Image: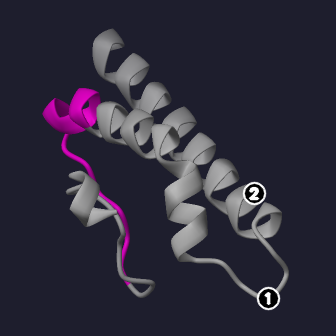
Amino acid sequence: MRALGARFLPVPTDDDLEIDAEEVAEFLRVVALLREHLYAIAENTRRPHGLAEPRAGPVRRLRNLEVAALHAQVIGAAS
């Protein structure tokens, strides 16, 4: 993911993802970029179960991150 320019991701499993308010728009661009390359990401993380399973996980995670970022953006705009 870093090779694609995803400077926010991945985050180490023992760390939290924290984005400053002024970085939310850039983070959303990164999420969109990763979504465009999901097939390649899934292909590189393929497990014995095939391609569908590894692709489903990143789709859910990216959507969760996107929803949280959009929520943060709305909260920031209302402040």
Q: Is residue 67 above or below residue 50?
A: above
Residue drawn at x 33%, y 62% is: 9
Instruction: Give the residue type at disc 2.
Output: Ala
* Residue under label 1: 48
Q: Is residue 78 above or below residue 45?
A: above
Q: Is residue 47 above or below residue 66?
A: below
User: Counting residues from the N terminus, which is met first, the one under dot 2 or under dot 1?
Assistant: 1
Given residues 79 and 71, the one toward you in this image is: 71
In this view, the residue farthest toward the left is: 22
Quadrant where the C terminus lies? top left
Horizontally, residue 22 falls left or right of residue 6, namely left
Label 2 element class: helix
Horizontally, residue 15 falls left or right of residue 39, namely left
Q: Position of residue 69 (x, y in %)?
A: 42, 35
* Residue under label 2: 56
Q: Is residue 24 magenta?
A: yes
Q: Position of residue 2 (x, y in %)?
A: 25, 64
